[in-house]
Amino acid sequence: MNRNLRKVLLPATIASVLAAGTISVPAAGAEDVTMAFCTWTGYAPMFIAKELGYFEDAGINMNIEIIEDESTYAALLTQGSVQFLATAQDPNIKMFANGAPSRYVLAMDASCGADGLVTTEDIKSLDDLKGKTLALDTAASSYYFFLTALEDASSLKEEDITLAEMSDTTEAGLAFMSGQVDAAIMWEPELSEALDSVEGAHALVTSANYPETILDSLVVNESYAQDHPEVVESVAKAWYKAVDYLKENPEEACELMASGFEEVTAEDIAGDMEGLQFFGREENETLNDSATERSIKAISQDMADFWMEKGECSTNDLTEFFSLLG
């Protein structure tokens, strides 16, 4: 399963998730909370928290909605239609920088090989991409990953390559597998499919080489966080407990994680997890330490500076975005 399945499994509308299995009835007076994210394994431990009663135990009636159309996220968060939102860190930064009242809560996961640049056999290095055609979705987080790799490990600039803009990363992968382009930025399962089906195809670079470039994070509506700090803390604790459960009970966890999505199996979840790192309490504490060289603030500042340069952010000042961290 991958993030782009959202454009295949469901239309670009809001669909409430009905988690499979026994759902506990929340106690009277529980706080009604709505969280939204798309079909992606990185967010799925939230279903562990829901199914095992971690939210209920904290007095929270958690409604998880699968919202596949990410262009609606900023408006939904601004209107208060959802209180919590999970998506990639750089879109979260762009939403905040362009006026969404969002506040960072925690890091959820990082791609450590689930995304990659796949090329034909003749392309042996990033410099060999000069004059070649590369398929990618410039709205996806993998665009930031690609340009970071290009700047770090080649002498090329973006304009040295012919970019074939795709509507999503699935389309990019299909364009490569059908022989329409020389290379493509894709993620699982297209990445593995391309390597298996196209003779000579190989991954020139993957997110395992640049694990800081594709992170997923949880944000909360600013006003809601001010009025309900205890809920924000409880949601974070529920996530940490879910990640702990995942690490200790991977098979059961995969079943619970798959239960919240349509047409997704535990095997799909397990396959995606091979290229992911989940962040529990300890990992978040390390990321939140501004004294470390690559804290979440430092990583995010690089993203904000990048998108500011691209003209997609009205500010790169993230002070308020991280205000809940102190």
Image (spheres, rainbow, N blue to C red):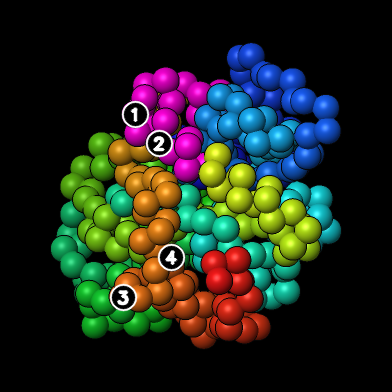
Q: Which residue is mark 2?
A: 244
> Residue drawn at (61%, 45%), measured in percent from left and top?
235
* Residue 215 drawn above or below residue 28: below
Query: What residue span does the magenta drawing correspond to?
Result: 239-262
Q: Residue at x 57, y 78 (%)?
A: 318
Image-quadrant location for residue 136: bottom left
The quarter of the picture where the C terminus appears is bottom right
**Residue 208 appears at what percent x and percent y?**
27, 55
User: Quick one: label 1 or label 4, which is nearer the N terminus?
Assistant: 1
Left or right: 117 in relation to 240: left
Residue in view at x 43 percent, y 26 percent: 253
Judging depth in this view, the residue of 187 and 211 nearest the camera is: 211
> Pointers 3 and 4 in contact (CB under 8 A)?
no
Give the residue at mark 1: 248
Which amino acid does the dot numbered 4 rest on? Asn
**Image coords of residue 37 (percent x, y):** 62, 45
Other-residue count near label 1 (Cα within 10 Å), few / some / many at <14 / 14–19 / ≥20: few
At label 3, which amino acid type do we have?
Glu
Point out the tag, 2 or 3, that comes first from the N-terminus.
Answer: 2
In the displayed structure, 229 sits above or below 303; it is above
Q: Which mark is residue 288?
A: 4
Label 3 sits on residue: 293
Quarter-wise, where is residue 157 in the image? bottom left
Q: Mark 2 belongs to which amino acid? A: Asp
What main secondary structure does the magenta stretch of the protein show? Answer: helix
Q: Find out whether the residues at labels 1 and 2 contact each other: C-beta distance under 8 Å.
A: yes
- Secondary element type, mark 3: loop
Does the stretch in magenta take in 164?
Answer: no
